[in-house]
Image (cartoon, rainbow, N blue to C red):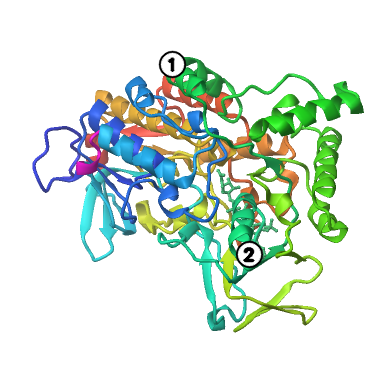
Amino acid sequence: MPDTSLSSPHAAGEPLDALIIGAGFSGLYMLHSLRDRLGLKVLAVDRAAGVGGTWYWNRYPGARCDSESHSYAYTFSEELWKGWSWTQRYPDHGEIRRYMDYVADTLDLRPDIRLETTVERCDFDDAANLWRVTLKGGELLSARFLITGVGCLSTANIPNLPGLADFAGAWYHTGAWPHAGVDFAGKRVGQVGTGSTGIQSAPVIAAEAKHLTVFQRTANYSTPAQNAPLAPERKAWIRDNLDAIRSVMLATTNGHPFTVTDRSLHDVTDAELTEILERAWDFGGLQFRAGFRDVLLDESANARMAGFLKDKIRRIVRDPAKAEILATIDHPYAGKRPPIDSGYFEAFNRDNVDLVDLRADPIERVVPSGVRLKSGREIPLDILVFATGYDALTGPLIKLNITGTGGRTLAKEWEAGPRTYLGLQVAGFPNLFTITGPGSPSVLCNMPVPIEQHVEWITGCIAHLREQGATRIETTPAAMEAWGREVKRAADATLLSRVPHSWYLGANVPGKPRVFMPYAGGMAHYRKLCAEVAAKGYEGFVLARPAAVAAE
Ligand code: NAP
């Protein structure tokens, strides 16, 4: 007789109602929502020794969020909101971890979190209608629902450089930074990568190290963060305006707390454009692109904005050779995730900072004393920093070794790219929910917004199952096919899918299929679609009651 119960109270040793993998933004709220709203028996596990998810690991020099602090927080609880006060416009990694600790303590989540607990594999037991989850060390947990909150950018992409094993110095990936920090004093450092991470770390490393060589494969835009401490009046305004802040975030495409102006780049003269962009530059942050609606829709409109930014680089960087390498950018502005910085281009004016254009002279191999380029030039190094990004979105999920019905594995199902319905479920994997999974807006947004939406949708879905007496929910191949077409349509309507070397497409990981992974149709629109699916009795999903499950 299959175990089909979904109720409380629970006797010890019974299967969990839900097992959550991850204790970051997703896992903490999911645990609170299922345990405290629905009264379910829930456990969250995380391989880290503390809560915080991605931010537990991301402690590299300069690591700071580029969402503004007042928008990088949960909005579901006024009490939680008012009990916390951010100190800076953009929180650094330490402050975000302190916030996550505050949330875990305030909501009393720790008794239901197991840290230093690594999931090795997840197998769906069809007869019992349960997920069987094997932990490192062999322990087995069982749960009706398996919910992943493993982050989108948590599986490091470490370049497979020949000779790395023989490097006599130390090397680090920014996403797994030593907690004790790295002492750069007196050291010759090489940094590979100039994405959001590398652009944050380079100026900080340059200020500490004897010498820094930045290895650039693709030149990148960046605008200043203009980070600063929050004034007391600003803090008070944030504390008292949760509803106003949230309503803006819910209405926007990317879940940020600012609205994009309904004006085309074609509607302004060159002089007007310069004036608008200079003001946006001084204001700082991701809001730089908010002055125009067609930045990501129209190539010629984008080129005007890109021209302004390339000129800025040429004006900031005094060495014309370096400036040319940095300003020769081959893709539209914001076509890749636009970084924001604190003194990135200025760092190249320091005497101790060099730049290597890997397009002109690629790394041939790592040698014990440093790096050898194809030209034969050798760069002596004591430390190598890989700011080389992540196997985004699919990597953390595939790593969980998930097997669904009929022995199908997620790795095999996604061999040609991820296929999901709404980024929430995969056919053949009943009762598995993927928070901010591929096919949802996720990384195109200010992350807490899509996380809260997914957590609340999944909670509503499980409550609905309980009301219906159902214990199983699974999407269909047809729903996934239709959603896959919508994900592609939305991406193709923007310039995002036209950047061949973007991690949104999986292009940064050798051998990864080139499929545009996040949903680019906008967070507000996506939220509406998900609500409609639920209102129509979970259209695109098949719900089953215990008898049906037992008869299968
Ligand atoms: P990324 O955007 O993928 O950038 C990785 C960099 O490494 C790129 O310059 C890439 O070059 C280079 N690279 C990768 N493999 C290489 C190789 N084999 N040889 C030479 N260069 C190589 O990764 P990231 O900077 O860690 O950022 C990832 C995402 O994390 C961001 O887009 C953002 O969503 C998030 N993030 C957010 C914040 C924040 O909130 N402030 C901070 C950091 C990161 P190509 O461009 O040629 O691939």
Q: Out of 453 and 461, give the one closest to the viewer.
A: 453
Q: In which quarter of the image is residue 424?
A: top left
Quadrant of ligand 1 in image:
bottom right
Mark 1 lies on residue: 240
Q: Out of 177 and 76, give the one closest to the viewer.
A: 177
- Of the 4 image quadrants, the one containing the C terminus is top left
Residue at image position (11%, 48%) is 13
Is 378 inside the magenta-drawn segment? no
Residue at image position (32%, 36%) is 102
Q: Does the beta carbon at disc 2 come under 8 Å from ligand 1?
A: no
Instruction: Tell me residue 48's x, y (percent).
Output: 34, 55
Kind of element beneath mark 1:
helix
Mark 1 residue crowding within 10 angstroms, few (<14) / some (14–19) / many (20+): some
Mark with earlier residue (2, 1): 2
Q: Out of 494 and 58, give the one closest to the viewer.
A: 58
Q: Out of 214 and 301, give the one closest to the viewer.
A: 214
Instruction: Tell me residue 311's x, y (percent).
Output: 85, 43
Is 438 placed above or below 322 here?
Answer: above
Is 208 placed above or below 264 here?
Answer: below
Mark pair 2, 1: CA separation: 42 Å
Q: What's the residue type where badge 2 is placed?
A: Gln
Could you tell me if residue 436 is visible in this image? yes
Kind of element beneath mark 2:
strand
Q: Give the range drawn in magenta.
A: 107-111
Q: Which label number is shown at residue 191?
A: 2
- Of the 4 image quadrants, the one containing the N terminus is top left
In the rendered view, does 40 fall on the left or right side of 246?
A: left
Instruction: Tell me residue 337's x, y (percent).
Output: 65, 44
Mark 2 residue crowding within 10 angstroms, few (<14) / some (14–19) / many (20+): many
